[in-house]
Image (spheres, rainbow, N blue to C red):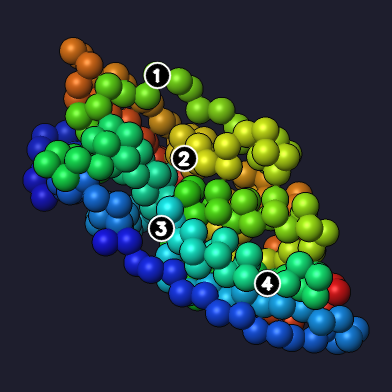
Amino acid sequence: MQTDTKSKIDQVTSPAGTAATVLRFEGDISSSSKDAVIGTYQGLSKTTAKTILLDFTKVEYINSSGIALVIQLLMEAANSGQKILAFGLSAHFQKVFTMVGITKYAGLFPDQTAALATV
Amino acid sequence: MTTTAARTTTVEVRLPSRLGFEKVAMSTASAVAKLMGFRDERIEDLKTAIAEACINAIEHGNRLNEKLSVGVVLSAGTDALEIRVMDDGKGMKQQPTKPDIDKKMHGEEDPRGMGMFLIQALVDEAEWVVGSNGKGSYVRLVIRLDKEES
């Protein structure tokens, strides 16, 4: 009965001309989201996808298992020299992400424009 | 919904032990908290805490056994809402620990296991009670109305 997580990939360019890959998630992020979160990330080229944005704008529900998947993604990205930024989280989930320490390894931004302005 | 003496109103929900059904408890708690006048930010805190409590009950307490159910009892008082999430497990004996993001990022700590920490951090009181005879354990959560809300 857990709602599936949908994911898609977009390529964007920052105002400074930096290429970035956006992983857009939709639905719930929970224990059943491994393929959508980790699988989608692992499908990216580690050579060309150096800046990755995580779009949570259409994510309605994240539980601690889902947060664990995000941490796993951050860990793999850090080991591959990739920079991660996240945007679109509600005020509540920005607070939760901050509480568990994710902000130490990924910047949180209100929207894509704000995130891209930093790269 | 029942109203007993001393201005306490009780709502009870019984969930199947299947992941995803914690959302029923979240919606119910949200509705009760809204009726009591809690502000939106606190209601979001409560929803996440209840989700984590129900997930623990479903996964660990009842071990995803769909023959068992998770009981959620919400007791709305004058200035506080108490929620009990009950399962048939032996209970959580360890206390919540703050997740260490550095250790998780270096593979030294399981990325999972943040549920109890979130529960305790998001509500005013959280108590894990081990049932007698190794069964019937529950977690008790309390959120209190701010002076501005009451």
> What's the distance in space between the residues labelled 4 and 2, CA to CA?
30 Å
Circle 1 — which element?
loop
Residue indicated by mark 3: A32
Looking at the image, is A40 positioned above or below residue A112? above
Three-letter code for the amino acid on which mark 2 is drawn: Gly
> What's the distance in space between the residues labelled 2 and 1, CA to CA?
14 Å
Q: Nearer the viewer, mark 3 or mark 4?
A: 4
The image position of residue A45, as x and y in percent, is 73, 72
The reply to the same-chain question for discs 2 and 1 is yes
Q: Chain of mark 1?
A: B
Q: Nearer the viewer, mark 4 or mark 1?
A: 4
Nearest the camera: B29 or B24? Answer: B24
CB within 8 Å, label 3 to label 4: no
Looking at the image, is B58 positioned above or below residue A10? above
Circle 2 — which element?
helix
Residue indicated by mark 1: B93
Q: Earlier in the sequence, mark 2 or mark 1?
A: 1
> What's the distance in space between the residues labelled 3 and 1, CA to CA?
27 Å
The reply to the same-chain question for discs 2 and 3 is no
